[in-house]
Image: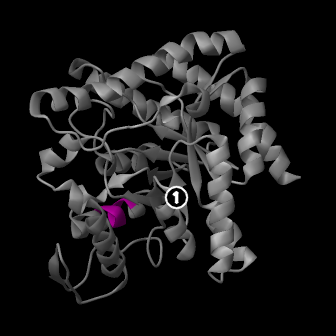
Amino acid sequence: MKFSNFLFPAAMDPAHDHRIINETVREAQLCDELGMDMLWLAEHHFDGICAYVDPVAFAAALATATRRIKIGFAVAQMSLHHPIRMAEQMALIDNLSGGRLVVGLGRGTAYNIYDYMGYGIDPAEAYERLVEAEDIMIKAWTTENFEHQGKYWKLKLPLLRPRPLTQPHPPIVRACSGEEAMVGMAQAGRPFLMNIQTNEVTRHRMDLYRSTMRESGFDEAAVSRSVDDSWVWRNIFVGETDAEAERLALPAFETQQEFRQAMRRRVYEEQGLLLKQETAPAARNDVRHSMVCGSPATVAEELAKIDAIGVGGLILVFRIGPMPYEVAEHSIKLFMQKVAPQFRKATVH
């Protein structure tokens, strides 16, 4: 099981943007130095939920600020990007990073209508735009004299430059918030990213993913490769003791949840617009399911339960809400020094 840091820093006051963005670069460099497998970047606009906002620009910065660690998107909201510009940018970052880029794509946010409003995009078009854009990007990376006549884009170009360093193109992974989308990825033999779910739902979906791939004609080697490239998301905090971890992490998690809902509520009150109503408590909003929190021994015990399910990697958010950088830094160090080695030894043996 691989481990990654989902760099998802909140800036609850615009006056803090500069500090938090630069602290996030330090956090990425720390993970690189400690030997973590991967960094993931988010995309959210206009609300401070993700301080750096633009994962493409930030990935380019991290490509030059780090040396070994892979960099991926969880995810780029493709309904907000022009596919040819995105293909060029991905090819550039693939070159800058020496082939360390993973292109994680999704339709766009399922809850924040103001993301779409700010870009003048109808959210009802988001999934169709994602599918068409992904097809355009792959063909632009792999063909010459490319022409496309689609619903949203009509394009003609001789040759996309720069060419990707990774051939035929950087790896692509799709975010799947629901089971139906995940099944579609399994039928195509493609890896996926799973949002925060309970361990029970995670087990069910991973079992379904494997069985669907087999039923679709993929052999065990292909199933193993796709599972290895699939990731599931949890929040995490490691303290010296369980009590310390709960004292530092739980209030930050509660503040984070309120902050993430505040702009959505404000837009609804001011404009009467809501993208999606949450009718039942989601796993990501329940600290019991969405966050692994405790001493190194407690965290290792909880992660072993996920490892037993059989997932490729964990997308872990270490810096929760308003948590000071130094507190998150200590959690990361404890994790890499006292938790991660237990799983890597198991893999070696």
Residue occupying the point 32% across, 22% down: 19
In the picture as drawn, the residue positioned furthest to the right comes out as 349
* Residue 214, above or below 252: below
**Between 69 and 195, which is closer to the camera in this rendering?**
195
Q: Quadrant of residue 334?
A: top right
Count up the numbered dots.
1
Q: Is residue 122 left or right of residue 13?
A: left
Q: Is residue 323 visible?
A: no
Tell me where residue 3 appears, x and y as whole percent: 63, 44
* Residue 177, above or below 240: below
Q: Quadrant of residue 183?
A: bottom right
Q: Secondary structure at mark 1?
A: helix
Tell me where residue 299 appears, x and y as whole percent: 71, 28
Q: Is residue 53 visible?
A: yes
Magenta stretch bounds: 89-93
Kind of residue at badge 1: Glu
Residue occupying the point 50% across, 58% down: 100
**Between 22 and 223, which is closer to the camera in this rendering?**
223
* Residue 90, above or below 162: above
Tell me where residue 304 appears, x and y as whole percent: 77, 40
Magenta segment: does it hold 87?
Answer: no
**Between 323 and 282, which is closer to the camera in this rendering?**
282
**How many other residues sit within 10 Å of disc 1, few (<14), some (14-19) or many (≥20)?**
some
What colour-coding does the image apply?
one colour
Tell me where residue 335 appears, x and y as whole percent: 67, 30
In the picture as drawn, the residue positioned furthest to the front comes out as 279
Q: Which residue is mark 1?
A: 179
Residue occupying the point 23% across, 70% down: 84
Magenta segment: does it hold 91?
Answer: yes
> Magenta segment, principal secondary structure?
helix
Residue occupying the point 11% across, 28% down: 270
